[in-house]
Image (tube, coloured by chain):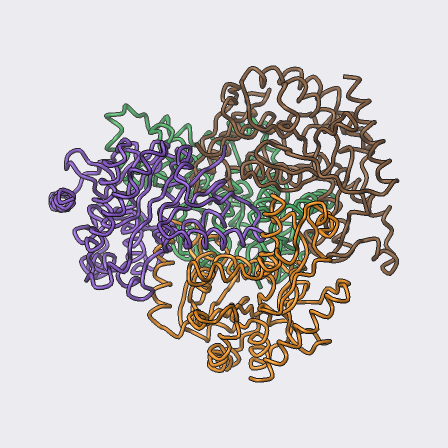
Chain colours: A green, B brown, C orange, D purple
Amino acid sequence: MGRKYAIIGVGHVGATIAFSLVTQGLADELILIDKNQKKARAEQLDLQDATARLSSHPKIKIQDYSELVNTDILFVTAGNIHALDNASGNRWAEFEYTREIVKDIAPKIKNSGFNGVLIDTMNPCDAITQYLQKEIGLPNSRVLGTGTFLDTARMQRVVSEKFEVDPKNVSGFVYGEHGESQFVAWSTVTVNGLAINTLTSKLNLDLEELEASARSGGWDIHSGKGYTSFAIATCAIKLSLAILDDAKLMCPCSFYNAKYESYVGQPGIIGKNGVESLVTIPLLPEEEQKLAISAATIKEKFATL
Amino acid sequence: MGRKYAIIGVGHVGATIAFSLVTQGLADELILIDKNQKKARAEQLDLQDATARLSSHPKIKIQDYSELVNTDILFVTAGNIHALDNASGNRWAEFEYTREIVKDIAPKIKNSGFNGVLIDTMNPCDAITQYLQKEIGLPNSRVLGTGTFLDTARMQRVVSEKFEVDPKNVSGFVYGEHGESQFVAWSTVTVNGLAINTLTSKLNLDLEELEASARSGGWDIHSGKGYTSFAIATCAIKLSLAILDDAKLMCPCSFYNAKYESYVGQPGIIGKNGVESLVTIPLLPEEEQKLAISAATIKEKFATL
Amino acid sequence: MGRKYAIIGVGHVGATIAFSLVTQGLADELILIDKNQKKARAEQLDLQDATARLSSHPKIKIQDYSELVNTDILFVTAGNIHALDNASGNRWAEFEYTREIVKDIAPKIKNSGFNGVLIDTMNPCDAITQYLQKEIGLPNSRVLGTGTFLDTARMQRVVSEKFEVDPKNVSGFVYGEHGESQFVAWSTVTVNGLAINTLTSKLNLDLEELEASARSGGWDIHSGKGYTSFAIATCAIKLSLAILDDAKLMCPCSFYNAKYESYVGQPGIIGKNGVESLVTIPLLPEEEQKLAISAATIKEKFATL
Amino acid sequence: MGRKYAIIGVGHVGATIAFSLVTQGLADELILIDKNQKKARAEQLDLQDATARLSSHPKIKIQDYSELVNTDILFVTAGNIHALDNASGNRWAEFEYTREIVKDIAPKIKNSGFNGVLIDTMNPCDAITQYLQKEIGLPNSRVLGTGTFLDTARMQRVVSEKFEVDPKNVSGFVYGEHGESQFVAWSTVTVNGLAINTLTSKLNLDLEELEASARSGGWDIHSGKGYTSFAIATCAIKLSLAILDDAKLMCPCSFYNAKYESYVGQPGIIGKNGVESLVTIPLLPEEEQKLAISAATIKEKFATL
């Protein structure tokens, strides 16, 4: 009955997701799990203290994997952001750490009988999501990573600032790794309904500069607040609602692409089964090549696991 | 036009307030100010990155006191939570630090021409709110502290858990300092519409234990996550919405009580002018005494400024 | 997965509930059923036309009782408001009509295998809800009527206007029939935390006048707009969310009272099983008597079915 | 302070807008005006009865034009839907009626000193909005009609159903009159990021059929429920929030086009000043011609006023 959510890892991202779910009345039941029992308990209490001031009163439980059996949406947001402190913009720096986390939690998820949809925000997002899928054994469609859904939002922001419009006036996609080899597929980007390529000359736009700005967006935030949390949490929740609604909403995110034999960021249709299909948009040859390279990068790193 | 919010201090509390305002579509315009320019910029970016995924698109600006002139609601949430790390449950440990902050920001607020309502979450909440009021020179009613609004929510949670009901089934108030001398006015507390005093005997309830549990709630959270943020942010926002709506909503919070010549936590009516009136509920003599003592404690500390 | 709602009867109340569920993102799946196929289809289309402008995209289906098998919440809002046009304030005027509706829909609900919680807004609310429960055969707790939840909201409004405060500052209950024999249990009513009885003398309040004003509130609306819809829909949705959250929220509504062998409006605890328990608040002897009379009135009318 | 809304005409559309503003916490102050005093009062009461069950408590006033002076957003939703009952799909049937309404209300709006943004939903939308603008004397940008914002939503729904995706996966615009001469500019329409023209052959899509279906969507609803309300209210509110946020959101709606010397449905940028600019998207020659014809139709009808 109702919407049952669980979050494994209640660091900055996980806790922000939990806060949103509770304060926006989105969850009816919420399970918080963290390797740090005191942290999970503190977040539970802080959220429960808020419920006297909210119109909703979701059930919030902690540390119980057995609750996953009938959970609709499971966010996996574990990670050690401090692994990035000297990382020079490389999310692979978190890999060694997050791999160990997956080795710990994947069997617990599997044994719980979880059969909902898993949304992963850990980094390096693509490889670790694939690793989670493999270890848990759920169908590919039911294990997805936020991937370039966030990078696309950043691209939309960066472009929208240049044009002084709402980011929702900007459409198009960032493809590839949620990491250094990602790229903006500029051939897919429109502003106010017009292909950005038709606008660059008259506006003297430097797309490479915009792309660098979008790509480095996360690092600017990381250097200023020590982590990123608000946009990634918002993206993760949006995916979850599309799943619960069975919305068939198109979102770029990280899921398996058979052609590249790898998880990679690309547009997919999100519904009750997770990523229900790949949306194949014709890219320019150089974009296709970038995607192949990015996917190969992920695949290679995945193989080192 | 619309709702204009500002936040001075975008630490955990301020940033959580900002996140709520943006993701819940509550603010049309939001000004973030922090002594750490990079932090303010990082929060701005993280919020702006979210707006491509939200239905709203508030304007978010940073570091500009001149924007306060037509701001409706100003949250002051500056503070140094690490001042509390060895504080053994004493919010006065933050006083020295927050006093310096006020000396810095109060003239800037005053000079901005700000004429909205200021909601303070800094600690020690009551004294520092009074100090802010004095330094800025706004009417008492327009400068309030969250005070025991949060402690009351915690009391509601603690009691509701005992009775296994929604915290909203629990009414009543925590009075006094948002600190050690606070107390639950049990004579005001009802559960499911019944005075708690009539229920304690049959349920073998220990009210002192419940009160201790409510009072220490914040410290349990602090020790588990290093700070508290979710419930305090939720309380602060609820106050702000009652102001914007001119709701005449009764909330316990910290405002000036002429009888005690001090700010202190007590129920008031919240409307467009801030705290528009004090609600005087008959207390038991021992409760009246506790309130007098708590107010005197605040007044004394305030005098040391 | 997610929240599944159904509504039987998409007249003004049912359609307003549907609109709220869709626009506020509360439902993941919504089934609309009406004896008028074109009306159900029109509401479906009007709601679906809105989804391009909303952040959510719930599934909306029509006219299919088989969907009830895994529905969480079923609203029954059928009725013929025009039966009231010459009713001189008597909801029993709808009885003959709604009884026929129940005879038609109850077997269909029963045969569907519906096992969620049914919330009834039809009039005369108490008797028809009991009739629904009997015909469908679900446990008493899982079939409830909005009953005096709406009348209580009206009492809160009327009192709050007198005191110029937020209706949420007013607590207390309207008991009895959602109809003429209802009464405000003034001994339970508080304003700003103070018993209203202690405030009447100094304010020269006439409680009988206030009560008449609350009771006639619905008729004033009916005469002005031809029906009532907004408050009743809001009440019904609030009950549903308490059920989905398993909130254990105290609400006055219509459910079975063994003492009176009848459904009647009274405070209960709302959780995932519907009305999970009766809250017995000591009433004054004259209030107890009014409740007994009101319950007897309902019982008698029910017997005529 | 806060968001101040007013609505002139609280029929189905106006009342639905009011209900949304109140239940979603969007308005801090709301003014309802109707030629039928009892209707305005009934809607006010029905909304106020709901506020005891809502977390917000907006001020709701009625029948006072003087309140418009500092109103941010004014919806004009007056009209007589029964004028359409024998209209065979022609919104011009409402013209005679709504023109008289405008002659009545325009001077009152003008004299109130209203200086916010006016959003009109009356039919025939384009001509009547232009007439309102002329009579009130506000700048063109501050008087807009919902126009083809609703028709575009319907086109998105119709196309999305064909492709079994979320309507938000469909972009593109309906141009022209909110009436019979409107047209879908198929060259602007994409589904899942792909131009619909590239998809039609393989899917055996009949665009003319889809267009007819979108155009007649309102009539299907009208014939089934007697009016349309939910989608139009949702569209109107979305425009208002973009204005309050100063969002610079691109929306098709009805505003003045100097080239055609007429109001007409077309994409514009919505910000705090209303429609801040026209978005000129290259159309096919036949689409340009349809737009010219549709604008000429509106202009001609406008001239008959």
Q: Would residue A31 appear left or right of A193 to someone viewing this image?
A: right
- Whether residue C161 is situated above or below residue D116 in the rendered picture: below
Q: Nearer the viewer, residue D292 or D27?
A: D27
- Residue D197 visible in rendering: no
Residue at the outermost bottom position: C304
Drawn side of residue A128 relative to residue B82, left or right: left
Left or right: D193 with respect to B102? left
Query: Residue B267: which quarter of the image?
Result: top right
Question: Seen in the image, is D181 located left or right of residue D49?
Answer: left
Q: Is residue D239 above or below residue A212?
A: below
Does residue D228 appear in the picture of this structure? yes
Dividing the image into 4 quarters, which one contains the C terminus of chain C?
Answer: bottom right
Which one is nearer the viewer's eye here, C164 or A24?
Answer: C164
Across and down, in percent, residue B46 comes to 51, 33
Q: Residue A122, percent across and down?
A: 56, 43
Taking the spot 57% from the left edge, 45% from the top edge, the residue there is: A20
Give the mark count: 0
Q: Residue at x 85, y 36 (%)?
A: B290
Residue A247 appears at what percent x and percent y?
A: 42, 56
- Which sits in the foreground, C92 or C116? C92
Quadrant position of residue C83: bottom left
Percent across and percent down for residue A206 are: 32, 25
